[in-house]
Each structure stands twice: as structure tokens, then as C-alpha cells.
Image (cartoon, rainbow, N blue to C red):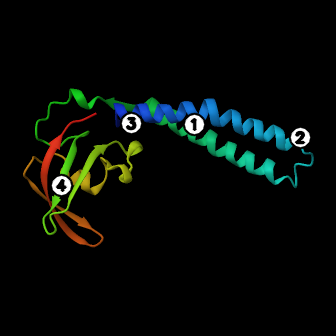
Amino acid sequence: MSRAPITSKGARRLRAELDELKSVKRPAVILAIAEARAHGDLKENAEYHAAREQQGFIEGRIKHLEGELSHAHVIDIATLTAGDRVVFGATVQLADAETDEERTYQIVGDLEADIKLGLIAISSPVARALIGKHEGDVITIEAPAGTREYEIVSVKYLD
């Protein structure tokens, strides 16, 4: 089994989520189940069934995070010496060739990707097009709206 890359910041964030699930949410749902069970007949007790369903989601997420973190290859971005070449962990500023609109993305592991935060998965088409390129290079990306060209304005390695 190959080890999935993850940034040290992403690993810390996922461990914090795991700790919250185990120490806060799991005990809360156990308490909710006990309270709902105290109400009597479980067949028609919607609170009980909702709490059990929530418990299933929490336990599933805990198992998923534990499994992913145990097989993850944590990479400390601060130790990378790639210069202006784009590799895993790079924060890349792109300029759209047509509109000059600028976007900034960090290439991260699949588990920690969140486009709203500008974190794109290494397996995404944009990241695949960027890997190995240098500052000043122009890349072409096939998007649903058509082909887009971007110039790599800057490459940084920030944690």
C-alpha cells in the first residue's frame, strides 16, 4: 500500500478533528443515547434513532481518520528545497492568461484538500498540470468551461 502524502499542517488539523470527535462529540452522543433510551419505547423514539445515526457517523469518521493518518506520509514543507519548481506543498500564485485574474493554491494531500481554503489535492488536474513547472511557465488546463491558460507568477513554500 502506498503512503498518501499530507502536509504537517494538514496532519495537525486532522489530529485535532480526531481528538474533538473522541473527547467531545463521542461522549455527547453517548449521553444523548442514554437520555433517549430513558424515555421508554425505542421503536418509536425518534431522538434515540437520530442519536444512534449520529453515533454511526462519528464512529465512521474516527475510523476513517485513524486509518488515513496511520498510513499518511507527513511532509514538512519548511524542509523542502525545490527553489522555484512546483512540487508537493508548494503555494502557487497563478494569473489567468485572458483575464489577468490571480489565484493562489497550495498543493496538498487528497485528505486535506479544501478548495474554499485554496488547498488543492495533488491528484487534481490543476495540481498535475503544475507539478514540475517553474515560476514564469505557462500551463494549459482542460476545464468544463473549456481550455484555460495560466502563468505561474510565484512559487513559495510556506507551512
Residue 93 position, x and y percent, is 19, 50
Three-letter code, disc 2: Ala
Q: Mark 4 touching mark 2, by CB under 8 A?
A: no
Q: Disc 2 and disc 1: Cα gap in Å?
A: 27 Å
Quick check: 143 above or below 28?
A: below
Residue 123 position, x and y percent, is 31, 50
Three-letter code, disc 4: Leu
User: Label 1, on which residue?
Assistant: 62
Three-letter code, disc 1: Ile
Q: Disc 1 and disc 3: Cα gap in Å?
A: 16 Å
User: Label 4, on which residue?
Assistant: 94
Residue at 63% in and 33% down: 24
Whichever of callouts 4 and 3 sits on the residue coming sooner in the sequence is: 3
Whichever of callouts 3 and 2 sits on the residue coming sooner in the sequence is: 3
Q: Is residue 3 visible?
A: no
User: Label 2, on which residue?
Assistant: 38
Residue 35 position, x and y percent, is 83, 40
95 and 10: which one is in front? 95
Q: Disc 4 and disc 2: Cα gap in Å?
A: 58 Å
Residue 134 position, x and y percent, is 10, 46
Q: Disc 3 and disc 2: Cα gap in Å?
A: 41 Å
Quick check: 159 above or below 99?
A: above
Q: Is residue 16 left or right of residue 56?
A: left
